[in-house]
Amino acid sequence: MNLIKKIIFSVILLTQIIPAQYAAAQNMAELNKAQASTGENEIIVFGSSAPYRTVSISAKVGGNVEYMPFAEGDYIKSGEVVLRVEKTDYELQAALADTQIERAKIALEQAGSDYKRLEELFKSNSASVQAKDNAFYAKLSAQANLNSAIANHKIAENMLNNTEITAPMNGFVSVKHREPGDFADKAKPVYDIVDLDLIKANLKVPELLISKIKKGDKIDISVDAYPGETFKGEIYEINPIGDQLTHFFKVNAIIQNTDHKLKAGMFLKAVIKTN
C-alpha cells in the first residue's frame, strides 16, 4: 500500500514540475531572443540598481542613546556625529583610572626610596643581601603596577571617547536601528548608510550574449523615473558562473551618480556598447 502511494505521489509531482520547468525554459528562450543585439556593437539587457557601498555603523560601547539625530533618508557627511551614548559611567571609570595612576606613582616613589636606603645600608654592612633584593623587587613590582594603571587609564579614556560615533563616509541613512532612549549594545548596528555617489547596476545577461561582453565596456542606462534621460556607466565585474535554470549571467556596472537621481532598487534598461 505504501509503495502504491509513493508511485502516485511521484506521478503527481512529475506532472507538476516538468511542465513548470518547460514553461520556464520557454520563457527564458523567448527572453534571450528579445535581449538580442540592437546593432553590431550594442546589446540590450535589464537589471536593477544597488548602492555601490553599504556601511553598518555600530556602537563601540554599550549605553543608553542620548543623541541620534538622523532619520531614514537623511544625508550624512563623513565625520558628523551620528550617535552619542550616556557617558557618566565611562567618565567615572576614567576618573578611577586617574586615581589608580596617582596611587601607583606614590607606591613607586616609596619603593624607590626604600630600595635606595637599603642599598646604602648594604654598602655599610647594615642590611642583608636578602633585604636589599626584596627592596629591589618591590621597586620593580611598583613600576609594573604603574604601567598597568597607565594601560587601564588608556582603556578607560578610549571607552569614554567611543561613547561618541562619527560617520565613516558620506551617505544616506537606509536603516535606523535605534532611537534616543533605547539601549545601544556594543557592536550592534545603529545605522545602515548607503553611498549613492556611485550606483551599481546588477544586470542579467543571457548565455548567448555573454561572450560579447567584457570588463570596461561602456553602457547607457535608462530608468522609467527619468524618461528620455541617459546615465553613463562601465562594466567592472562579470560573474563566471551562470544560473543553471535560466542561463543568465550576473554582470555588474558602475554608474556615476553625484546628483543622486538614481536610487537603489530601480529597474534598469542598459545598452551595452561592445567593441
Image (cartoon, rainbow, N blue to C red):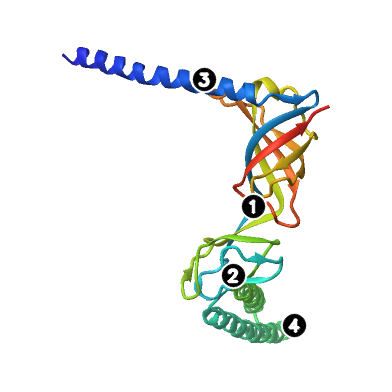
Q: Secondary structure at mark 3?
A: helix
Q: CA distance from mark 2 to mark 1?
A: 19 Å
* Marked residue nearer the N-terminal end (4 or 3): 3
* For discs 2 and 1, the disc positioned in front in the rendered view: 1
Quarter of the image with the C terminus is: top right
* Marked residue nearer the N-terminal end (2 or 1): 2
Are discs 4 and 3 less than 8 Å apart at CB?
no
Above or below residue 111? Residue 76 is above
Are discs 1 and 4 less than 8 Å apart at CB?
no
Residue type at mark 2 is Phe
Residue 263: assigned label: 1
Residue 267 visible from this viewpoint? yes
Nearer to the camera, 91 or 198: 198
Can you identify the residue that label 4 sits on? 123
Q: Secondary structure at mark 4?
A: helix
Above or below residue 3? Residue 97 is below
* For discs 2 and 4, the disc positioned in front in the rendered view: 2
Residue type at mark 1 is Lys
* For discs 4 and 3, the disc positioned in front in the rendered view: 3
Q: Secondary structure at mark 1?
A: loop
Q: Position of residue 8 (x, y in %)?
A: 25, 15
Can you identify the residue that label 2 sits on? 70
